[in-house]
Image (cartoon, helix red, strand yellow):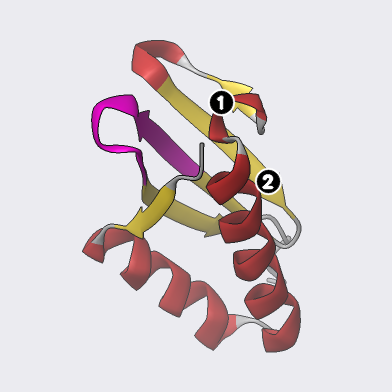
Amino acid sequence: MKYRVAWTPSAQEHLASVWLSSPDRQAVTSAAAAIDADLVKDPQSQGESRSGGVRILIRRPLGVLYEVVEEDGTVYVFAAWTTERRSR
């Protein structure tokens, strides 16, 4: 089964913030594309499970939280963050 990946508005804002503050924007873009590609194929086997049906997936320099809704074949990404350390 092929899934549809939907980034919530909040996750899109998180992703934009990560991209804008990244010293390597291409790496963030590539990571987001890789996450989408992984989640379209088999989201239940990607990343690690968390409580309540939530899963976490990291493709450096990006991490996401997502949930799979089997009934409509959709993966909802609802949070994104950078995995890179911020300089102080």
- Name the dominant secondary structure of the magenta segment: strand
Q: Is 43 above or below relative to 13? A: above
Q: Quadrant of residue 84?
A: bottom right
Q: Which mark is residue 58?
A: 2
Q: Quadrant of residue 69?
A: top left
Residue drawn at (25%, 36%), measured in percent from left and top? Answer: 72
Q: Residue at x 61, y 44 (%)?
A: 41
Q: 30 left or right of 11?
A: right
Task: Work out how far the residue at label 2 is from the one at label 1, CA to CA, in angstroms.
Answer: 14 Å
Residue on which disc 1 sits: 44
- The quarter of the image holding the C terminus is bottom right
Residue 80 in view here:
yes
Q: Nearer the viewer, residue 18 or 27?
A: 27
- Span shown in magenta: 65-75
Crowd rating for badge 1 (residues with CA inside 10 Å; few <14, some 14–19, many 20+): some
Q: Amino acid at mark 2?
A: Ile
> Is 69 colored magenta in this rendering?
yes
Where residue 75 sits: x, y (%)?
Answer: 39, 43
